[in-house]
Image (spheres, rainbow, N blue to C red):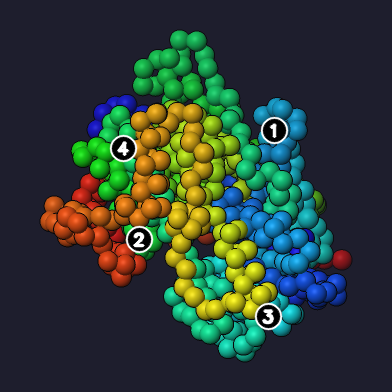
Amino acid sequence: MTLDFIVLALLTIITAATPLVFAAMGELITEKSGVLNLGVEGMMLTGAVTGFASVFFFESAIVACIAAMLAGTLTALLFAFLVLTLQASQVATGLALTIFGVGLSALLGQNMVGIAYEGLPTLSIPYLTELPIVGKLLFGQDFLVYLSLALPFLVAWFLYRTRAGLILRAVGDSHDAAHAIGYPVIRIRYCATLFGGAMAGLAGAYLSLVYSPMWVENMTAGRGWIALALVVFATWRPWRLFLGAYLFGGITILQLHAQAVGINIASQFMSMLPYIITIVVLVLISRDRNKIKLNAPACIGKPFHPAA
Amino acid sequence: MRKTTLLKTLTASMSAAALLIGAVNAQAATKVGFVYVGPVGDHGWSYQHDQGRLELVKEMGSDVETTFVESVPEGADAERVIRKLAGSGHDVIFTTSFGYMNPTLKVAKQFPNVKFEHATGYKRADNISTFSGRFYEGRAVIGTIAGHMSKTGVAGYIASFPIPEVIRGINAFTLAMRKVNPEAQVKVVWVNSWFDPGKEGDATKALIDQGADIITQHTDSPAPLQVAEARGVHAFGQATDMSAFAPNAHLTAIVNNWGPYYIKQTKAAIDGSWKSTDSWVGLKGGMVKMAPYGSAVSADAKTAADAVVAGIIDGSLHPFQGPINNQKGEQVTKQGETVAIGELLGMNWYVEGVQGELPK
């Protein structure tokens, strides 16, 4: 196995993990505030189709990403209105949001099937990008990858080092207590849900602009659900989540490589590996029951009725 | 006429309403119904079936009135959709996925006057015909091109599920490629999905990283072509002409061309000559077509590929002509013989030149 080969594999792993990082980090914040949004897949698809359409309409990758985030935010707003204002069931509404996103994105994307896009521009710094081995890996990515690498730092810092993060966690752990000391529980949950939507939209844009730069119906192929699962298995910790996303992406890619090399293991088993290994590793590193209780938002999924 | 719905899960029930509206303006026109397993926007299997429907409309004009229902899951929903179509005055109904076999059979019993056409299945009745394409013939053509075009002698094959249809394609491709370059190797990666653009693209990258300089696929999305284009290797389209996604990399595509069959069967239903048949049509009948060659295809490759197409059409060439060795190098088909049709339909072994073990 040559060094070049390892670099090539790493490059593929980064693209596989990046959408998961975005979607899962957004959902992490949402869940930390006590809201369970199962509609990640739907929000991602809406973001993917909007991002793809916008890149042709506005001819700017950055505007396309912002548009995708807005689209994700709008679908999340719909969800938030239903579950926070109208107090509908979060589980049922989240599932409905996924189905809605699948249909809405298919409708919006009708005329975009069969169009190709060349993909986001990648960073190119003279000399640095041309460095052997590390050049392309460190200095040759698109801007979304760098953003996704910064995200766990930002999310961890926000949650554990800022006052706003503390309040968010308080709302997720005990909405009654937070309400009693005067925090606007519903408004905070709205913000967290909208952030989750924006990140899911961005994850969708990564799929339709970088990962496989095109629009086809249902192109997320279940990645929203994987992001949701990662949040739980990472016990709501940003860095474990990041690790989980890369583990999942990494093993997915390595099993494809193993098949291409011709290793004689059933391909069905290989396809299963990313799921098993990610779950096993995350469960092992977070098996402390008390710590799980500490990290899990106690009020997740529970509707908040402010006492009159 | 797009009578479809947004929500996949609601497709079946809501389409019933659409059909009722459609029935109001029914006149003397023959009503033809189509049931698709995927969205027409998949740019693959269902998309090509819908292109066939559009061809039918173009050919027959106001003599036919067509209805389609997309994204119909293979199961109880399918039966309901097919029954709705049959009950609302459709004369011919095309059910275009393998999993619609039993639902079609069930509904056909209740509607003896409606003609049913089921794609890729094997159960027939007096009012059910089955049809499918001999896509392995197209695989032989692209295998020939691959043999001429590959410099490394290694082709990468992105496969979906280890079923006879897919294995037959891998073998036909490999046999044709090795006829040109006896040293050629085919690396297969199974993604265990018909449609996952991200994973198909990743598999393509893995194959290219392992030395493949020509990519072919038996999955539905154009993602492998995009990766091939970005990496500067060559690839073939699947089910439909995918050159828009890879103007330089796209050498040709095996195109599923259902239109002529739809027209023929609908006309037969109108003039009363319709009979229950089993059609397995290839290049000769036009159900399998090759997309125009890309600019990268060399003159040698073009000549050889044209010769294969001509040979298959006039019957002088069969993609599974002996001698054929299996992976262990044992001869399974002798010189001058061809693999029997039953063997083709249930194919569960690799020919020599395919790398890796066939998943069971």
Instruction: Give left or right: position of A49 versus A138.
Output: right
Instruction: Quote the CA–CA distance across marks 1 and 3.
Output: 44 Å
**Residue B94 location, quadrant:** bottom right
Which residue position is annotated with label 4?
A: B147
Q: Earlier in the sequence, mark 4 or mark 3?
A: 3
Which residue position is annotated with label 1?
A: A55
Which residue position is annotated with label 2?
A: B162
Task: From this view, report whether residue A32 is shown above or below residue B109.
Answer: above
What x and y, as percent, mark residue A150?
56, 32
Q: Residues within 10 Å of mark 2 (few under 14, many from 20)?
A: some
Which residue position is annotated with label 3?
A: B86
Instruction: Quote the CA–CA distance across marks 4 and 2.
Output: 24 Å
Q: Secondary structure at mark 2?
A: loop
Instruction: Quote the CA–CA distance across marks 4 and 3.
Output: 48 Å
Q: Residue B77: which disc?
A: none
Q: Secondary structure at mark 1?
A: helix
Mark 4 near mark 1, Cβ–Cβ under 8 Å?
no
